[in-house]
Image: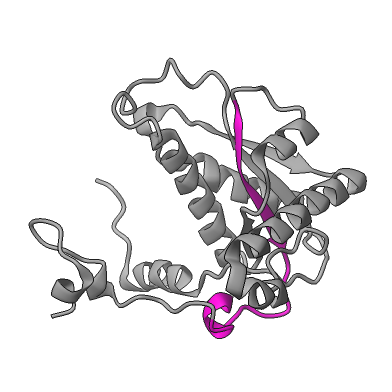
Amino acid sequence: MTYQFNENERDTVYRVIDERRDMRHFIGGQIADEVLQRLLKAAHHAPSVGFMQPWRFIRITQPQLRESIYQVVQAERIRTAAALKERDTEFLRLKVEGVRDCAELLVVALMDKREPHIFGRRSMPEMDLASAACAIQNIWLAARAENLGMGWVSLFEPEELKALLNMPADSQPIAILCLGPVAEFYPKPMLESEDWASRQKLNTVLMENGWQDNAEADQ
C-alpha cells in the first residue's frame, strides 16, 4: 500500500507552492553540500516525456566565470529594455537577477543529441523543454522548503552562454538559477509589488469543453 499523506503534510505542500517566489535579492552565504545535493536530486526526480531526462546542470564555481555570466545577462538586459520601448526606463529600474550575490549559481540546459528521442516528441518536440521546466520547478519548490531563495534568470543570449560554457552545438541553455539564503521572502511576487503586472484571476485562464476568450470565461 502506498503511503497516504496526512492533512498537515498535504497543507505544507500547498503552502510551499503558494509561498514560492522568484528571488532577486540574496545575502551571500553558502549552501551546505548535502542541501545542494537534495535540491539537485529533487530536480532529477522530475517527470520527463519518454523518461528522456533531458536536463543538464552546470554548477558555476569559478568567480571569473560567474562574472562573465553576469556580463552576458547585463548585455541582454539592455537589449530587452530597448525592445520594451516605452517601458524601458521602468524595466531598467527593476532588479532582474542575483548572479553576483547568490550562494550558488547553476545553468540548466537541454542535453545534446536529443533528436533520436521521439517518444512523446514526434509531434511536439518542445516537450523536452517542458520536461526540463518541471525539473526547475522541483528545485524551486525544494529550495523554498529548505528556506532558500531561488531566482530563474532568462535574460541571456543562448549562443553567448553556450560559447562561454563550451556546450555542444545541439545543446541549449534554458535557465540561469540563482540560489541561496535571503533576508526575507517577498510577501507577493516582486513584479506584482513593483506594479509591472498582476496575477490573473483563475477563471480567466480556465476553460471548459473548448476555447473561450477572457470575456466569456469571466462571466
Query: Taking 29 as reference, is 37 above or below it?
Result: above
Task: Find residue 115 and report its horizontal and vertical position in percent.
Answer: 45, 19
Residue 48 figure quarter = top left
Query: What residue is rendered at 83% in x and 65% in y?
Result: 29
Regarding residue 197, the answer to whether it shows in the image is: yes
Front-most of 172 and 138?
Answer: 172
Position of 164 compared to 209: left or right?
right
Is residue 71 part of the magenta span, yes or no? no
Furthest-front residue in this view: 85
Query: What residue is rendered at 80% in x and 53% in y?
Result: 70
Task: Find residue 114 and report its horizontal and vertical position in percent.
Answer: 49, 22
- The magenta stretch is 171-195
Query: Taking 41 as reference, is 77 above or below it?
Result: below
Task: Find residue 161 and report its horizontal and vertical position in percent.
Answer: 73, 39
Position of 112 compared to 69: left or right?
left
Front-most of 146 and 54?
Answer: 54
Query: Taking 51 as reference, is 95 above or below it?
Result: below
Residue 51 figure quarter = top left
Task: Find residue 64 and report its horizontal and vertical position in percent.
Answer: 92, 46
Q: Where, quadrant-wise, is the C terminus in this rendering?
A: bottom left
